Image: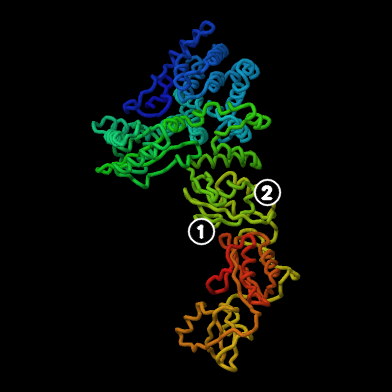
Amino acid sequence: MSAEATNSATPGPVSGAVTPAVPRRKSRARIDLRRLGRAALLGPTARGRLPDAISHVVDAHRAHHPEADLEPLRRAYVLAESSHRGQMRKSGEPYITHPLAVTLILAELGAETTTLTASLLHDTVEDTDVTLDQVGEQFGEEVRFLVDGVTKLEKVDYGAAAEPETFRKMLVATGNDVRVMSIKLADRLHNMRTLGVMRPEKQARIAKVTRDVLIPLAERLGVQALKTELEDLVFAILHPEEYEHIRGLIAENAARSDDPLTEMADEMRTVLREAGIQAEVLIRPRHFVSVHRVSRKRGRLRGADFGRLLVLVNEDADCYGVLGELHTCMTPVVSEFKDFIAVPKFNLYQSLHTAVAREDGQVAEVLIRTHQMHKVAEAGVVALGNPYTGSADEQAAAGDGERADPTRPGWLSRLLDWQEAAPDPDTFWSTLREDLAQDREITVFRPDGGTLGLPEGATCVDAAYAQYGEDAHACIGARVNGRLATLSTVLRDGDSVQLLMGQDPASEPSREWLEHAHTPGARIAIQRWIASHPAPGGTGADQSEEGAPFRQPADNAPGAKEQPAFRPGAEGAGGRPAAGVLADRPGAAVRLAGCCTPVPPDEITGFAVRGGAVTVHRAGCTAVARMRGAGRSEVGVRWGDTTECRVTLVAESFVRPHLLADLTEAMAQEGAEIVSATVEPPTQQRVRHTYTVELPDAGRLPGLMRAMRNVAGVYDVSRAHAPAQRA
C-alpha cells in the first residue's frame, strides 16, 4: 500500500500493503480505474465477446481456474453495466467501476465463478431496478442467494447505534454461505481504498467500524490478504502521524545496501538444496501495522524485523523436513516454534512457525508451509471455492433451507450455535463485540484425543460448554494436565483437560461461573439458566458462597443424629473411651485419640498422659513424633476382640446442590451411624466435609470410604489428620 492509498486516483494493491520502495514478488500491474471507467462508458461489446472492461478479471480468474466457464461473467457484466449506467461514484468514476474492482479483488484471491458473478451483481438489487427474481432466473439460485445475502449486509448500520437483530440476521446469512461475507469484505476494501474523496470525519467513522467489526471478521474467516490491507488503510486514517513514522522507517530500511533477510534467505536456500528438499524461499515484507506492532514490542528495529522468510514446499512432510534442516544447520530460537499444521488455527490457517538467529543477534521469523496452505493462509474461505458442490444426496441431507458446509471454520459454526441461544439481540450484539475483540486462540486437548479451540484467557468453564453445550450445567470439576483444578482455572495453549461430569440430571451451574466464562457459548448458556432460575430470597447457613445450596440432613434422614458439631481433635487429648484396646498398663484408662481416630486393624501406639490415662494413636499420626519428642512415656497397646469402631473421615468435593444429602444417604447404606458432621464454607468451588461415624464392624471402613468417593462431586476421602487411606 502506498501513502496515498486512500486517494481515489491511486487505489492500493489487491494483497499485501507495503511501500513501493520495498521489493516484493511479482504481481499483476495495478488496474487504472479511469481506464476501466472509459471502457465501461463504451457499453457492452458484441454478443458472445467479453467486454474489454472485465478482461483483467478474466485474466486473474483464469490464473486460478483455467477451465472456468466465462459466459456467466460476461452476462453478469452486461446486466450490471446496463443497470448502473448513468450512476456515478463520489470520486467521479462510473459506478460500474466499483463492482468491477470488487470482483477483481476476489478473482486475485482465487474465488470461483459463482462468487465473481454475484460480486458483479452485488449492488444491482439495492441500487437499480433489477430484482432478485430476475437474478435467479438468469443466473440460478446460487447467485441469487449470494446477491440477496450481500444486499442484506448493505442495509446493516455497523456503528454504535447498529440494530443488533439486523446484524444477527446478517451473520446467519453469512454462516449459511461464507462467500457472502467474502464479497462484503472485498466491497469494504475497495471503498476504503477510495475513501479520500470523503470528509475527514466520515473517513474516521468508516475506519472505526472497519477496525471494530470487519477486520476481526476477516481474521476469523482467514482472509489475511484483505485483513492486512484493511488494517493499513485504517491505520493511515486513524493514526496518520504514527503511519508516517512507520512509512519512513520502512523506506529507510529499503534504502540500505545490506539486507540481513536476503543473506539469510540465500543461506537457507543452500541448506535446503544440499539436503535435497525442493523448496521456494521468499522474503515477505511486513505490512505497516505489523511493523508498528514489532516496533512497540522490541523497540529499535533492525533489518530482520521488517519482514519474514517464507518457505514453500509441495508436501506436508516436507514442512517438517525443512524445519529439521533449519534447526540443525542454523541457530534456532526454540521459544518461537509453533506447529499450526498439526493443530490448525480456528480460521483454517496452517503453517510451521520458527525463528533463526545470526551471529550478530538479528533474528528472522520463518514460516514453513505447502503451496496449498499458503493459498488458504492468504485467501482463507475464499480459497475453498464453492463448498456446496457435493452430491444431491449430500445437499438433501442438510435439511430444509440448510446448507451442509464441511469446510466452514469452527469459529463460524460456534457463532451460529450461540446466536441461536442468545436470549435477546442486545446480548448477542454485546457478546459478539467482546468475542471479536479476542484475536488469539488456544488449543486444548481432550482425553479422547480430540481438541477444543478456545480464545486466549478461556477457563475450564468455557471448555465445559464448548464440549458439552448446556449439558455442562452438570460439570463438577476438571483435571488439567492430570491434576485437579477448579472450573475457574485459566487454560493455556496445549493443556490437556478432562471435565468431570456429575450424574445428577438436576445438576445446576453455579452463578459464580459467569465471572469465569469468557466465550459467548458459555456466557449465554449460564445467563439463560440464571434467567430461568431466580436466586432464592433467603441466604441462610445452607447457602454456599457460590450460590449453590447445600441441604442439611433432615431429622429423619438416614443415619442422621442430633449431635453437636464436631471438629477433629475437639474431644481433647484423651479422646473417647476405647473398650476394644488392651494396654500394657493394667487399670489405666485407655482412650482413642481424637486427632486420628484409629480403628482396627490400624497399627497403633499409646502414650501415658496426665492422670495415668493412656491415649491411643495411629502409628502414622503426626502427633506421635511430637509426643516422642516431648518425652512422653510410650505404652504398648493392641486391639482386643471387639470389631466396633468410631472413625472421623474427611471428604473433599466440588460444590453442587444436594451433595450433603447424597453423602449421608450413601453412608447410611453402608451401615455407618453419623455421630457428628461439619461442612466448612466453600472456597474456590470446593468444599470440605468432616464426619465422625460409628461402624458395627471396622472391616466395613474401606467399603464406606469407597461409597463416599463414588458420590458425584466427591474427589477424595481420607481419615482425619492422617495420611489418606485408600480402600
Between 66 and 86, the residue placed more toward the observer is 66
Q: Nearer the viewer, residue 274 or 193?
A: 274
Counting from the top left corner in percent of width and height, residue 319 is at 39, 37
Give the SS element for disc 1.
strand
Estimate how packed mark 1 is, as few (under 14), some (14 to 19) or many (20 or more) residues with alpha carbons within 10 Å: few
Residue 506 is left or right of residue 237, and the answer is right
First in residue order: circle 2 vs circle 1: 1
Is there CB contact under 8 Å for labels 2 and 1? Answer: no
Is the image coloured rainbow, by chain, by secondary structure, or in one colour? rainbow
Q: Residue furthest bottom?
A: 587
Quadrant where the image shows the N terminus: top left
Looking at the rendered structure, the kind of residue marked 2 is Ala
Visible residue check, residue 261: no
Residue 163 is labelled as none
716 over 675 or under it: above or below: above
Q: Is residue 237 above or below residue 31?
A: below
Q: Position of residue 264 (x, y in %)?
A: 28, 36
Q: Considering the numbered disc 2 on the image, is that residue within a helix, a strand or a loop? A: helix
Mark 2 surroundings within 10 Å by alpha-carbon count, few (fewer than 14), some (14 through 19), many (20 or more)? few
Q: What is the x, y in percent for residue 60?
A: 45, 20
Q: Residue furthest left?
A: 257
Q: Is residue 223 above or below residue 442?
A: above
Q: Which mark is residue 483?
A: 1
